[in-house]
Amino acid sequence: MKHRLAYLVFWSVVIFLAAGFDVMAEVRERNLYWAPEAATVGAKKVDTLLNFIFYLTAAVFVLTQSVYIYYLVKYRRRPGSKAYYSHGNNKLEIIWTAIPTAIFLGLVIYSNRLWAELHSPAPEDSVRVDVVSYQFGWDMRYAGADGRLGEVDVHSYSVDNKFGLVPDDAAGDDDFSSTELVIPVNRPVHIYLHSRDVIHSFYVPQFRLYQAAVPGRTIAWVWFEPTRTGNFELACSQICGSGHYNMKAPIRVVSQEEFAKWQAGKIAAKAEEAKAAAAARALRTSTAASDPSGPAPRNKENKL
Ligand SMILES: [Cu+2]
């Protein structure tokens, strides 16, 4: 009776937990028992290696277990049959040690080369994006009309300078920002990863990419080439505080034409913004100069 109750409680808890987690889990219509679809050149290479290892170990598992079960049944204890003591077979031992050694060495060499390839310097024609993480969100910065990203100094982060731009570097003046990561398909994308506060993580399962963003550092080796258009999600994968669960940003992989159009629109908007700011500045200076009771002029010449 006691055992029965224990059983009941145990299975109730298991079913309750399983059902609960099932409800909370992200809804995935496809690839329910596999990784999400690979969407970059590098991700496909990672998957090739992953699948090879999976099918190899699956085959070895089935093979060894079948042999094991076969002999378990064949030489089971039966009346009249005598046990036989075996000292082993050196030749066989050498063979079954040498084969896995060769396979493992091959895997080490192959995966090491793949790792080196994925971490090689980004191609020159990459689209460069400065990705800044913070509690709790993401800011992206793209080069403006000059095609150059302004220099960053990790000590310069402030409320007014959310990308930590170096004031002396004019290349940063026309850089534009975005809260979504918009990137073109079939072109390498080079990410400069930063953090303004604590450790966050740039994680995109479909890109098979996971990289921590460390405050005080510029991480410049992340690059990838998307192979299909579509919407993805950039989610922080490092528990970084109370709002971590909601630290995400949309990723839109678009056609190269669409990207060029989006970029041109952003550059034009930025130029417009700069013009309006300059006009406002000029107006402020002129009203201050004509009205002595107005606010003190800010330019250096009139400083006391
Ligand atoms: Cu985070």
Image: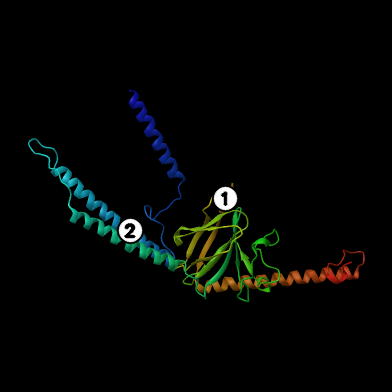
Q: What kind of element bears circle 2?
A: helix
Residue 50, above or below 290: above
Q: In the image, residue 152 lies at what x, y percent? A: 64, 66
> Assess mark 1: CB under 8 A from ligand 1?
yes
Residue 83, above or below 292: above
Query: Disc 1 and disc 2: Cα gap in Å?
Result: 33 Å
Q: What kind of element bears circle 1?
A: loop
10 Å neighbourhood of mark 2: few (<14), some, or many (≥20)?
Answer: few
The answer to which of 58 and 235 lies nearer the viewer is 58
Q: Is residue 150 left or right of residue 65?
A: right
Task: Point out the tag, 1 or 2, that comes first from the N-terminus.
Answer: 2
Q: Quadrant of the N terminus?
A: top left
Disc 2 residue type (three-letter): Ile
Q: Which residue is mark 2?
A: 53
Residue at 45 percent of width and 62 percent of height? 207
Q: Is residue 273 left or right of residue 261?
A: right
Residue at 59 percent of width and 49 percent of height? 243
Residue at 39 percent of width and 30 percent of height? 9
Q: Which residue is mark 1?
A: 240
Q: In the image, residue 201 lies at what x, y percent? A: 53, 56
Disc 1 residue type (three-letter): Cys
Q: In the image, residue 40 lies at what x, y percent? A: 44, 66
> Assess mark 2: CB under 8 A from ligand 1?
no
In the picture, residue 191 is in which quadrant? bottom right
10 Å neighbourhood of mark 1: few (<14), some, or many (≥20)?
Answer: some
Q: Is residue 115 left or right of residue 152?
A: left
In the picture, residue 104 is in which quadrant? bottom left
Residue at 65 percent of width and 65 percent of height? 153
Q: In the image, residue 58 lies at what x, y percent? A: 28, 54
